[in-house]
Each structure stands twice: as C-alpha cells, then as structure tokens.
Amino acid sequence: CVPSGVTEVERRAVRQAAAKAGARQVTVIEEPMAAAIGAGLPTAEPVGSMIVDIGGGTAEVAVISLSGIVASRSVRCAGDALDQSITSFIKRKYNLLVGERTAEQIKLEIGSACPPDPTDTEHGETTMEIKGRNLVDGLPKDILIRSEEVREAMNENLMRIVEAIKDTLECTPPELSSDIIDRGIMLSGGGALLRG
C-alpha cells in the first residue's frame, strides 16, 4: 500500500523493495483503495463511495468508483498530530508534561470531534484524571481534564481533515456526489475510533 498521490518513482521503489524481499508478484495499491476494499465498499461498481482513512501520520480522503480513485486528498494530519495537540495544550494550559501514551489514552477515552448531544445523558461531557510531571517544580502532579478541553486542543487538526473532505467533494463529479449523499462516508483507521 502507498499513500494516494505518490510519484511514479516512489511506486517503483516500493515494487523493487517488495521484489528484493522475495515477492514473486507485486501489485501496488493506494491506501484509500485498500481501506475501501477492507471496509466492504462496492469499489468495482458504478457508484461513488467516499472513504476517509485516518491513520497515525496521514489522513487519506478518496472518492472511489469503477475500481479507481476519482478524487483524493492526503493531509499529514492524523492520529499522531491529534495526540501532539493534546500534549501541547496540557503543557501550555497546565504546565504539565504528559507522554504520548497518555495523550492517546485521553483522546480515546474522552476525546470527541464535536460536542455531545445535550439530550444524551449517557454520553455527555466527561472528565479524566491524568498524571504528569509539573514543569514548574519537576514533581509528579495530577489534574482533571474535561472533554471540551480535549476537543478544543484537537480542533485545528480536525478542521484540516474536514477541509480535505470538502476539497475532495468539490472535485467529485455530481453523479458520484449524489451517491455519497445517499450512502454516506466510510471512516477507517485508528482515527475513526474518535467519537463524533
């Protein structure tokens, strides 16, 4: 698998590396297509399907129809960037240093892309106690972080992914756009675990 938009030189390098590793037959497929096939989307049919694959390093957005990618965007803003934005926010606001694993745990436990439905009492705003190192005195410290703070921390990076989705839709033919309206957008990758 290669990210969408790679050059022919990069494709050739992947083919050569696989052949040198002992592969008899090498087929290079773009990540969004692999994600769409894995998600069970009708990639070979004459309908438009949109997939948003939010991995660790990149978010790949693609519209797929008739076994090909019709329009796509790739942004270097995904799960790792969301974790980093949480770490930076906590450092800036609370003078507390937390590790990557803690930031990812915060993202998965109380992070969300949008505010919860006010009528949903079961999944409302939540808090989480986190531990880190106080940057003022170097001692361990506990704080309580709220889900709306986590959302605020991730907002800029999430908006970059949303913009990539909008840009891809703007480049999509009208017939396929109507299919996407009817069928929805498939999210995949670790970033798809984020609520909202």
Image (spheres, helix red, strand yellow):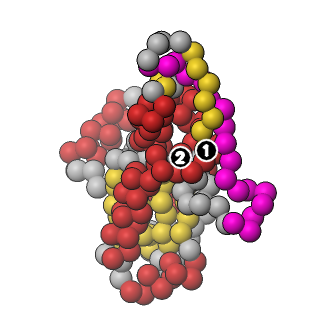
- Tell me: 172 left or right of 128: left
Q: Nearer the viewer, residue 88 or 22?
A: 88
Quadrant of the image occupied by residue 20? top left
The magenta stretch is 118-135
Query: Is 113 placed left or right of 66 in the picture?
Result: right
State whether residue 110 appears in this view. yes
- Neighbourhood count class around disc 1 (C-alpha, 10 Å): few under 14, some 14–19, many 20 upward: some
Q: Position of residue 171 (x, y in %)?
A: 31, 75
Q: Which mark is residue 146?
A: 1
Three-letter amino acid code at the position of disc 2: Glu
Q: Give percent across and percent down for residue 127.
A: 67, 42
Residue 183 shown left or right of residue 125 in the figure:
left
Residue 80 in view of the camera? no
The vertical placement of 133 against 74, above or below, is above
> Is residue 129 rendered magenta in the image?
yes
Residue at mark 2: 149
Secondary element type, mark 1: strand
Q: Looking at the image, which residue is at 54% across and 56% down?
A: 113
Q: Is residue 40 above or below residue 132?
A: below
* C-alpha span from label 2 to label 1: 5 Å
Viewer-closest of 97 and 105: 97
User: Which residue appears at 40% of the width and 51% of the height?
Assistant: 157
The residue shown at (56%, 60%) is 114
Q: Are marks 2 and 1 in contact (CB under 8 Å)?
A: yes
Secondary element under disc 2, as helix, strand or loop, is helix
